[in-house]
Amino acid sequence: MMPREAEIAIIGAGIVGLCAALELARDGAEVVVLDDAARHAGTVANAGSLHVQMQSRFIRMYPDQVPGLERSLPLYVAAARRWAELEAELGTGFELKASGGLMVAETPESYEFLARKCERENRLGLTVEMLGRAELARIAPYLGEAVIGAEFCAEEGKLNPLLANQAVRRALLAVGGLLLPESRVARIERDGAAWLLHHAGGTLRAGRVVIAAGAGTGALLAPLGLDVPTVAEPLHMNVTEATAPLIGHLVQHAERMITLKQLAAGQCVIGGGWPARLAGAEQHPTVEASSLIGNLRLASHIVPRLARLRLIRTWAGVNTTCDGQNILGEAPGLPGLFLAVPGDAGYTLGPLVGRLAAAALQGRDGGFDIAPFSAARFRAAA
Ligand SMILES: Cc1cc2nc3c(=O)[nH]c(=O)nc-3n(C[C@H](O)[C@H](O)[C@H](O)COP(=O)(O)OP(=O)(O)OC[C@H]3O[C@@H](n4cnc5c(N)ncnc54)[C@H](O)[C@@H]3O)c2cc1C
């Protein structure tokens, strides 16, 4: 039976919506989560990298976003730790490993850029250090000769999202949360002090609503008069056959689009933001051959032994971009409607952003000042 009433409705069953729902259901709330069949979702497609240090490529591309990125730095540290707590709480391993992350440089200029970033991040309280070629040869002998140094962040790591997503979903169902995975919300409408959600299976009346719909968030809010410019960004991913332990860290590049890591079972995951496209009437995330070739060529340049492995799967998924920062808290002028969209590296942020959204809805202090992440900033900018 499709429910018609709920205390709390959550739109979006990505990592943020699931984690917000889990927090609320654990506190005894009646929670219904509606999703659009994960048609455009990062949670079911991502690489499982736990990012903490600032991405130097983004600093160069979007210098105007640097103050926001710096303000968000403590959240990334807390978010990586929250993942470890969650794994322990749920009692299910999701291959989480804080193995440390290397952002590699190939030229003296980009090494210098990383060194300045490293100094700035240390001043902001992050524990990061620069490593030269000799130290890299010792701790990361798998890196190719083109790499001359790297910035190392011990807090970074990886997990297996296939295991983590399942574990969170199971935990939510076990505490009584209701999941409607094929219930796209077409429209949200005010109904007295509550909200009506018109979805694929009918209408749900909810006292309070969390919108954790990733790239779909802007379209839900626009008819309510709030401009939140979320954009769907289709991205490319690859995974190789399993091999003996090879890549011990999360590896990124100072200038180029690459993330590399190895899963516990030995497969190497290769990604880093290469573009895919939305194709056909269904706007299905679809692989671009140029990204496949470019991503793999760069991967085997950074870690030459990858060139000997066969690719077993390549896929595309939809990331959400906005202005690089979280969108969190009650929507301005829309009482009872809460927003939960993570900033860049949103899977890393997912459980923490879910927790902060749940705390905002309950009127509790979640441990961070979320005022700077209010959607009011878009209104001010407009
Ligand atoms: C290929 C790829 C690799 C990535 N790798 C990493 C990584 O290694 N590390 C990292 O930190 N981040 C990574 N990301 C980013 C990360 O996956 C996302 O930022 C994160 O999953 C966002 O979670 P979310 O819950 O906010 O949104 P999503 O996972 O996008 O979920 C939003 C959900 O809302 C639903 N929805 C939307 N509109 C509606 C509607 N109208 N009605 C009902 N439901 C709706 C969608 O179906 C979807 O399931 C990657 C992204 C991609 C695409």
Image (tube, helix red, strand yellow):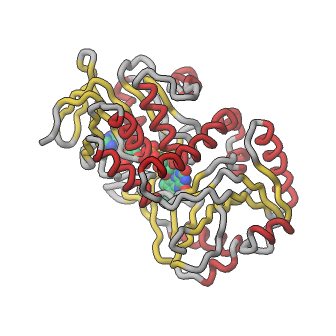
Which of these two is toward me, 159 or 346? Answer: 159
The residue positioned farthest toward the bottom in the image shown? 308
Q: Residue at x 60, y 40 (%)?
A: 78
Query: Does residue 198 lie above or below 288 as drawn?
Result: above
Q: Residue at x 48, y 51 (%)?
A: 87
Query: Does residue 181 lie above or below 47 as drawn?
Result: above
Q: Residue at x 63, y 80 (%)?
A: 307
Report which quarter residue 139 is drawn in: bottom right
Which of these two is toward me, 82 or 31? Answer: 82
Q: Position of residue 376 (x, y in %)?
A: 52, 22
Confirm whether residue 235 shows in the render.
no
Q: Position of residue 80 (x, y in %)?
A: 58, 47
Query: Does residue 31 lie above or below 90 as drawn?
Result: above
Q: Quadrant of the C terminus?
A: top right
Which of these two is toward me, 324 or 292? Answer: 324
Report the label total.
0
Q: Quadrant of the N terminus?
A: top left
Confirm whether residue 239 shows in the render.
yes
Q: Position of residue 378 (x, y in %)?
A: 53, 26
Query: Does residue 340 lie above or below 208 as drawn?
Result: below
Q: Residue at x 23, y 30 (%)?
A: 6
Relative to residue 376, is residue 212 drawn left or right? Answer: left
Report which quarter residue 111 is drawn in: bottom right
Q: Position of residue 224 (x, y in %)?
A: 36, 24
